[in-house]
Amino acid sequence: MNDYNYYLKKIGEYAEVTEITYPIVKAVGLPGAKIKEIVIFESGEIGQIHDLNSDCIRIILFSPNAVKVGTKVSRTDSQLKVPARDDYFGHVLDPFCNPLLVPLAKKKVDTFLQIDIAPLSIHERVKISKPLVTGTALVDIVLPLGLGQRELILGDRKTGKSTFVLSAIKTHIDNGAIAIYAAIGNKKSDIKALEEFMNGEENRKKNMIIVASSAFDSPGLIYLTPFTAMALAEYYRSKGKDVLVIMDDLLTHAKFYREFSLLAESFPGRDSYPGDIFHIHAKLLERAGNFPHPEKDSVSITCLPIAETQDADLTGYIVSNLMSITDGHLFFDGNVYARGARPAINIPLSVTRVGKQTQDKLTKDVNRELTSLLSIYERVENLSHFGTEVSDSVKNTLALGEKIQYFFNQPEGTTFSKEVYLVLFALIWLGIFNTEAEIEVAREKLQVAAATPEGDKFLTDLLNTDTLNGLLKVTGNNKDAIIKMMN
């Protein structure tokens, strides 16, 4: 961007700052100003026009330093754009795409992205048909996600939301896609931890970008963070890449937007949030989806926005807004976490509206059997607390339900292939494994087998069937071979 004198000479308009309520600056002048137009102050700071009145304009300041009263400001006749480069991977960027830690090589940039644009219309999209494999069995089998889906991740603090998201990033990158993490007003220690995760493996460093703003940045700059992440996702999507975008978190985003909107004297609505907060989040998240591509069948932007709840309250204004915008939600419950379940997802209160249509027939049948079993198990478990005598069938249901619960209990930071869990499920369902120790040994050995050419062929042959009954039949006919492999 050029300096103040360049735009003053080019456009011939300027205003003077009359009042400052950081980060909102009130100025008089600029008769040709437009909403969301970028302005530049003579001291070098950059801002964006928030609203226009008959007697003044209000500007959001992106700099951490306030300007002085009387400072002159010129408009640029352009919306906010960020440079697009192919060497952002492995870097932590601010919302203007400037590297925060390791500098980028100097080069001319020819492509600039407007970060706040309208989403593509429905006729420019295609049906979501491919699964998003997260490496978490409970999600991949019972609450599946699709490439291009928008799935809200919500729950109280310290319930495993970030652990699940990082596992999803790891698996997504291993499957040849890229990930963009938008850290919105996070603590600097959290941003540093994200950088360490990104640099933990070479594959991640080559396929992951972090767009970050800290709590010490201007509220205006924090507000831009998810928009920059989405603009970069659209850029890489145009190059034929499937992109996973994490937004951590949109509740913080809404709070910072409320802060400077109230300072700009916007009319407050429910919980003092401005009335357009729903529109802002809906417009942002609608940019995700599955889209046609000239060189591939389709490319996707999958978005996992995060929202932190208070005392598991799902009726909060922003949380309920996001639930209505997205294609479902995964609820990480503190009570489930306290029971030791990992991931601590409350299955009855979680929803996926798109993911099941991406499952093959085999996985759909497994999904149906598991959902039915878990529903019955929860009902009979509640009755068993009364101490009444139960029938043998109820005892069998309780025993199988407990094994399935342990089957879904996945150590933090570990990921497994869907094939491993389908085979393991069949072995548990048939009663070949009846203790937690046997299930754990089987899980480890199946994972090792799946990582070898022979084991991969074994799993492929085993799963080459169309129905759950076929899977169980094939597994049953190969009991001796499976047990031999386990030993």
Image: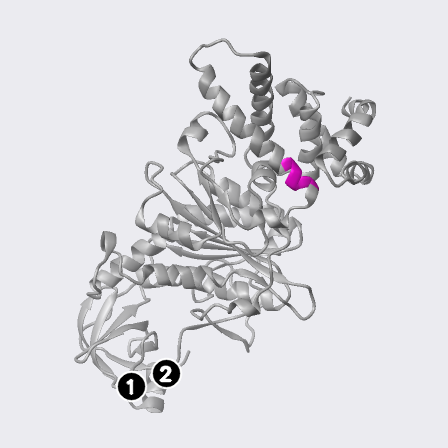
- The magenta region covers 362-366
- Name which residue type carries label 1: Gly
Give the secondary structure at mark 2. Answer: loop
In the picture shown, does residue 159 fall above or below 290?
A: above
Quadrant location of the N terminus? bottom left
- Name which residue type carries label 2: Asp
Q: Is residue 218 visible?
A: no
Give me the C-alpha separation between circle 2 and circle 1. 9 Å
- Mark nearer the N terminus (2 vs 1): 1
Quadrant location of the C terminus? top right
| Residue at image mark 2 | 77
Q: Is residue 157 left or right of residue 446?
A: left
In the picture shown, does residue 268 fall above or below 29?
A: above
In the picture shown, does residue 414 fall above or below 360?
A: above
Question: Circles 2 and 1: CB distance less than 8 Å?
Answer: yes
For the point 67% across and 25% down, the residue is: 429
For the point 29% across and 68% down, the residue is: 61
The residue carrying pointer 2 sits among few (fewer than 14), some (14 to 19) or many (20 or more) residues within 10 Å by Cα, namely some
For the point 29% across and 86% down, the residue is: 32
Q: Is residue 338 left or right of residue 358?
A: left
Query: Magenta stretch containing residue 32, yes or no?
Result: no
Towards the viewer: 302 or 475: 475
For the point 51% across and 50% down, the residue is: 195
| Residue at image mark 1 | 32
Q: Position of residue 442 (x, y in %)?
A: 70, 26
